[in-house]
Image (cartoon, rainbow, N blue to C red):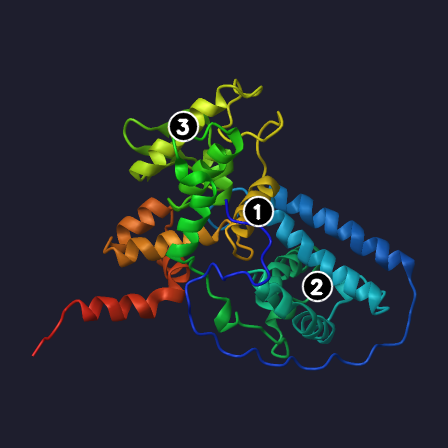
Amino acid sequence: MPSTATTARKSPLRAVATPPVTTAAPVAARPARSKTAAAVAQRESMIEEFADVLRAKTNRNGRPYAPRTIGAYRDAAIALHHWMTKERIYDGFTGCDVDTLNRFFRWYQRTHDRKQHESFTGGTNTKQRNLRHLFTWLAEEYDHPHPWDDKKFQRYSAPQDATPKTLSDDFIKDVLKVTEGGSPRVRDFERTRDHAMIRVLTEGVRADELLRLTVDSLHLEEGVLQVPPIKGARAARAGRIVPLQPKTVIALRRYLRAREGHRHAGGGYLWLGTRGRGHLKYSGLYRMLNRRSEQAGYGKVAPHMHRHTWTHEMLEAGVSAENVMEAGGWKDRSMLRRYAADMAAQRAVSAIHQLGDRH
């Protein structure tokens, strides 16, 4: 197995040129202190009320918000709350005007965007989109003027170098090799499980879908698995079908044999933890992927990057956009473009070169 001690880790991503990061505007001067503990308590109460409202609402597709989505919207509100407290701004959220929000986002871009770019998240643009839901609720519930409707509101677009990242072929091969390449001689539960999980991720499933799989989700004789929609099984009748590569089927069969000896083998969930633990959670998946990446000599990766990679591979292989959307569980073509964005130019060049001489 490759050594985990590396001085310079390789990048797991396919090489794509990125533009330089621009310098953010300076933060405005701190206002005079006006200490009102009641306003702080009011903001904290509003955050919890906002989260309760989200749990009772549905999104634009009529589906309940996923817990991670609610958490992201709530975290954005908490970030604003903490900043207002630090800046000695003791107004409630309903007292947060456009100028205050603009200051907050300038501070956020200056202090977070570079760090978040390095950890593959969306930075100020994502935080702004998530926080918009709080002020939409404030406008509906408290008749608070919506800052997004004000011409003075400063919007932040997604940085061009923050498009979805596609993992390299070498990275995927090396990470699979770290788990002994799916060798039938490997009897270790953890390595067998990790190899099978990585294989399933290369099939384009979402991390949430992967972790909600049950043993009954597998139809290995037909070479497919069936997953419920990301927002919950009640949003669709049966769930979508995901075709599996032959090596993925073999890896899953080996994992099922190793799983039989686990103390929680009688449970419904497919993926089980080590040392007798039950259902594997997202934190366990994230740690596993980065541990295997480090062992292979690479830096950090996120589970969703495998889905970006799958999208690129399908389009590069000539699979139609309609079939990719069906297999990937997308109804909106804009999502397909987003996931395939960072390698679009390379696919265009390759497709035209295959035509050879035209005149």
Query: What x and y, as percent, mark residue 325?
Result: 33, 50
Residue located beneath label 2 in the image:
144
Residue located beneath label 3 in the image:
254
On-image quarter of the C terminus:
bottom left
Q: Is mark 1 on a helix, strand or loop?
A: helix
Query: What x and y, as percent, mark residue 346?
Result: 31, 68
Q: How far apart are marks 2 and 3 (CA)?
A: 58 Å
Relative vertical location of residue 252 with respect to residue 117 in this rendering, above or below: above
Q: Which circle's residue, 2 or 3, is located before the other in the chain?
A: 2
Q: Nearer the viewer, mark 2 or mark 1?
A: 1
Q: Which circle's residue, 2 or 1, is located before the other in the chain?
A: 2
Of 272 and 172, nearer the camera is 172
Q: What element carries label 3?
A: helix
Q: Which amino acid does label 3 sit on?
A: Arg
Q: Which circle's residue, 3 or 1, is located before the other in the chain?
A: 3
Q: Which residue is drawn at 55% across and 21% down?
A: 262
Report whether 292 appears left or right of 215: right
Q: Which amino acid does label 2 sit on?
A: His
Residue located beneath label 1 in the image:
291
> Does residue 67 appear anywhere in the picture?
yes
Which quarter of the picture shows residue 333? bottom left
